[in-house]
Amino acid sequence: MFETSLPDDFPVPEFQSKLWAFNTHVHTVIPSQFWKTKPVNCKRIEIDTPDDDFIEIDVLDLNNTQPIVALFHGLEGSSERVYIRNLMHDLKLQGFSSVAMNFRGCGSKLNKQPRFYHSGETTDYKLFFNWISETFPGRPVYAVGFSLGANALIKSLGEWKENHPVEQAVAVSPPFDLKRGSYRMHHGINRLYEYRFLRTLSGKLEQKRTLHPDLPTFSGNSIYDFDDQVTAKIHGFNSADHYYDTCSSRLFIKDVQKPLLIIHSKEDTLCPFEYAPHYDINNNDHVDYIFTRKGGHVGFINKEENWLNRSIIQWFKHR
């Protein structure tokens, strides 16, 4: 129940959606809200940034010589989300080390500077990758991004081309077109997701305003409004449209020069599949894909457990 550009003999497990996972919302909500988090004993570290701020990261099992996998969460997620923690657990079982980044404002502490994070933020990515390379010289580095984190990962791959420090990467459920995705978020049942995102984003903005009273206020009712009134102004964009038109991952796939696997569901309600740049994906030899018929957004409820994590690990082991 998927399409893939990988060779027929590549050991990707078959994806067969459970019968009760009958639509995109079941696939999207059940894993994020009801799946149990596997136990992992992470250590939290703070990395100082050049602008007198910090990034919180969680590290697991860094005392071996195997590849280190860098993990990037989605919008309003964190390194403690079930999809991050469970992948860290499964990677460790296969001998990999892992390091999960919390975007600014998504860790346990309030950051000092006005800036937040966004779908095109690659400056902190570079700082994070540099920290890994300097702290563990000679260790191969892989990367996995989810949703917003996947968008920024693809953007970094396209920007840095052959100079990117990762040897291979996986992008799960990336929003190929940020503008169209924001419009889709504001319609139908997707507004329930939007409401939840806006509630936490607005709360963080108010916390930030206690330190920086001059930060913009938010008076809208959509992700587009938040990006137009807040994200764009804080991060140097002219508008939400300017932000979307310069940071959408579809713009950077043609320039990727490191092995990249895109895993995406055709029924993804938050990051619609129809906005994928299929020509660029099919004409870049560095890019492979697995497109499932069902799976929702970062969901992929399969008859056999851990389909997504097993697919990611198989890619890293056999690419």
Image (tube, rainbow, N blue to C red):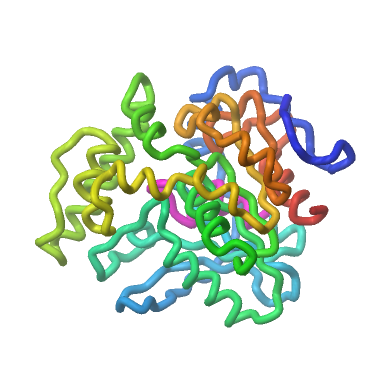
> What quarter of the picture does the N terminus occupy?
top right
Which stretch appears magenta?
Answer: 75-90
Where does residue 112 sit, x and y in percent of width and height? 25, 70
Residue 306 seen by the camera? no
Q: At x 40% / y 69%, what residue is drawn?
A: 55
Give the left or right position of residue 95, taking residue 176 as reference.
Answer: right
Where does residue 199 sit, x and y in percent of width and height? 26, 41
Where does residue 92 sit, x and y in percent of width and height? 70, 61
Q: Observer-nearest residue: 26 or 252?
A: 252
Give the left or right position of residue 260, taking residue 78 as reference.
Answer: right
Residue 255 seen by the camera? yes
Q: Observer-nearest residue: 164 or 298?
A: 164
Q: At x 65% / y 73%, what residue is drawn?
A: 62
Image height check: is 309 above or below 187?
A: below
Q: Is residue 112 magenta?
A: no
Image height check: is 45 above or below 74?
A: below
Q: At x 66% / y 57%, what residue is drawn?
A: 257
Of all residues shown, which one is farthest toward the left? 213
Determine which quarter of the picture holds residue 283.
Answer: top right
Image height check: is 56 above or below 13?
A: below
Q: Observer-nearest residue: 257 or 61?
A: 257
Determine which quarter of the picture holds residue 262.
Answer: top right
Where does residue 258 sit, x and y in percent of width and height? 67, 58
Q: How many marks?
A: 0
Q: At x 35% / y 34%, what residue is drawn?
A: 182
Q: Is residue 80 magenta?
A: yes
